[in-house]
Image (cartoon, rainbow, N blue to C red):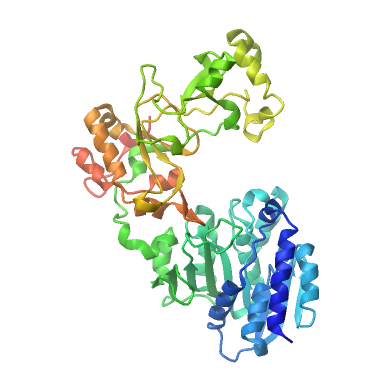
């Protein structure tokens, strides 16, 4: 058997199969092939956790064309006693059956999550499971997957991606002491839906290592995802268990690496920041942004191109200002981090934009603003049938998002010359903002500070001085270094410096708790 020739044929097969599918089709199915060199690295690392002469009974639950199987045969051909693969898509599965028919592989064209087994069959599992987001799973499929996982004792959130179900359901196939390696998105390490996976890794098995690739170094040419490899042994952990966390570089030569106890992993809600603890600079008692501000996502219009109009469009359509609100443009148009206002409260920015927001029904609107009524009719068969609009009582009314004095960008990349991933913006105008921003509404304890020009600037400068690592450490990161912050994550960013502006108010870690006065009224 010429393994090198088989790998060349497999690489060509992968290329042909991928070309015959659109990017959208592969995204929906979560089909992102593992590069062979990466598969080889993962395979070599995985075999290091097994005995040097132990025969290998191998499983890949998401086989594709077989990058991991090829790597296994290339590196350890004499140790492979048996091999099982599952591939749901016949487009990849059928030619793969032909390709590997001269080996001992049993490749099944089937959905792995539907295959039942009640006994461990393998001692080595290596898999790059399909990266299918939860909203691509039907309600029926999701309910079945959740039931199946619950029968094993793991309750997964409805927000979990398909890869989470693969990790849990594969447990039934593992012999005692079997080694598993999973190439998965690293987001499970820091998001709420990943809690069940982390619980599984700390309670049900012995977690060996997690390597998180640098988000700037995307592992897949066709997927914007930050990747990690998780290794564990099918054995309950002990109090002495130590886990190797590594980051960046290669698996063999990471840029950072350290050992952590199970207790340390239980205490840290975001594992992505464990190797960067020196930049946290906060204790559990620190004052955080959420103690001082109520943080909301900007409004989701349902169709920005339809509901957000330029000043010229408003004039051309002859729409009055009665049912228009000023709204900020995308952050890329804001050259400064402070927005001034004109005499009407409109932001002095370019482009100047207005949001349609009308509480009147169509009959009332005909009398109140005929020009606007005519314009809205043009979206009755298109925009009105969108997901958000059709769920509203009046399809063109908007969420309540009053102007906020301070905003933060929702996502961004750290750039050259020190460009931060996130920007705070001081807003003097009456403009609201769309969901590319997070809106910070002051709670009573800091509301008075934003009423004075000097103290408002002091608060703003304190926000701008937050170390960027504190913010990125709370959020999540995607391939290519794209950082994102949800409201709860921004709320958890420490802000102890604010105590200097509130000398007479009880703060966490001093006289007492923040108390009811910090509740948004």
Q: Residue furthest top?
A: 367
Q: Is residue 404 above or below residue 88?
A: above
Which residue does the image show at 66% across and 33% down from the upper left?
386
How many discs appear?
Answer: 0
Which residue does the image show at 75% across and 65% down from the upper left?
92
x and y percentages locating residue 328 in the rendered image? 45, 30
Location of the C terminus (image quadrant): top left
190 or 428: nearer the viewer: 428
Q: Say whether residue 118 is left or right of residue 491.
A: right
x and y percentages locating residue 291 in the rendered image? 34, 41
x and y percentages locating residue 199 in the rendered image? 51, 63
x and y percentages locating residue 77 in the rendered image? 66, 87
Q: Is residue 461 above or below residue 181?
A: above
State the image quarter where residue 362 is shown. top right
Residue 295 visible in the displayed image: yes
Q: Is residue 199 above or below residue 321?
A: below
Q: Residue furthest bottom?
A: 53
Q: Say whether residue 228 is left or right of residue 429.
A: right
Residue 119 visible in the displayed image: no
State the image quarter where residue 161 is shown. bottom right
284 or 112: nearer the viewer: 112
Q: Is residue 69 above or below residue 402?
A: below
Which residue does the image show at 38% across and 65% down from the upper left?
275
Location of the N terminus (image quadrant): bottom right
């Amino acid at each position: 058997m010429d393994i090198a020739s088989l790998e060349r044929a497999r690489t060509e097969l992968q290329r042909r199969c991928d070309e015959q599918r659109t990017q959208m089709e592969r995204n929906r199915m979560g089909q992102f092939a593992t590069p062979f060199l990466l598969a080889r690295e993962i395979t070599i690392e995985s075999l290091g956790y097994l005995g040097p002469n132990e025969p290998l009974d191998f499983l890949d639950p998401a086989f594709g064309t077989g990058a991991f199987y090829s790597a296994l045969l290339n590196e350890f051909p004499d140790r492979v006693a048996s091999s099982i693969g599952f591939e749901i898509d016949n487009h990849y599965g059928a030619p793969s059956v032909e390709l590997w028919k001269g080996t001992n592989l049993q490749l099944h064209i089937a959905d792995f999550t539907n295959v039942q087994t009640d006994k461990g069959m393998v001692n080595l599992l290596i898999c790059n499971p399909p990266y299918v987001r939860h909203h691509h799973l039907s309600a029926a499929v999701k309910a079945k997957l959740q039931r199946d996982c619950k029968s094993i004792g793991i309750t997964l959130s409805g927000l979990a991606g398909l890869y989470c179900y693969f990790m849990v359901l594969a447990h039934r196939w593992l012999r005692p002491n079997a080694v598993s390696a999973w190439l998965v998105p690293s987001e499970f390490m820091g998001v709420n839906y990943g809690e069940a996976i982390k619980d599984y890794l700390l309670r049900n098995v012995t977690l060996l290592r997690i390597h998180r690739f640098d988000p700037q170094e995307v592992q897949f040419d066709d997927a914007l995802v930050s990747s990690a490899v998780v290794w564990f042994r099918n054995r309950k952990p002990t109090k002495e268990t130590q886990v190797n966390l590594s980051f960046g570089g290669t698996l063999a030569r990471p840029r950072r690496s350290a050992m952590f106890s199970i207790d340390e992993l239980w205490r840290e809600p975001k594992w992505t920041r464990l190797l960067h603890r020196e930049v946290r600079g906060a204790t559990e008692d620190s004052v955080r942004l959420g103690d001082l501000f109520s943080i909301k996502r900007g409004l989701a219009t349902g169709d920005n191109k339809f509901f957000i109009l330029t000043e010229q469009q408003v004039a051309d359509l002859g729409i009055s200002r009665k049912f228009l609100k000023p709204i900020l443009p995308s952050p890329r148009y804001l050259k400064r981090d402070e927005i001034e206002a004109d005499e009407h409260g409109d932001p002095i920015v370019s482009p100047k934009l207005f949001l349609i927001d009308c509480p009147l029904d169509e009959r009332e609107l005909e009398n109140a603003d005929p020009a606007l009524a005519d314009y809205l009719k043009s979206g009755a068969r298109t925009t009105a049938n969108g997901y958000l609009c059709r769920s509203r009582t009046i399809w063109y009314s908007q969420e309540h998002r009053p102007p906020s004095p301070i905003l933060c960008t929702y996502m961004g990349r750290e750039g050259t010359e020190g460009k931060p991933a996130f920007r705070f913006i001081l807003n003097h105008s009456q403009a609201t903002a769309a969901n590319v921003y997070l809106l910070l509404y002051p709670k009573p304890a800091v509301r008075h500070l934003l009423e004075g020009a000097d103290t408002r600037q002091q608060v703003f400068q304190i926000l701008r001085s937050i170390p960027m690592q504190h913010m990125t450490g709370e959020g999540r990161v995607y391939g290519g270094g794209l950082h994102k912050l949800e409201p709860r994550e921004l709320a958890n960013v420490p802000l102890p410096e604010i105590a200097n502006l509130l000398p007479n108010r009880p703060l966490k870690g001093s006289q007492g708790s923040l108390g009811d006065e910090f509740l948004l009224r």
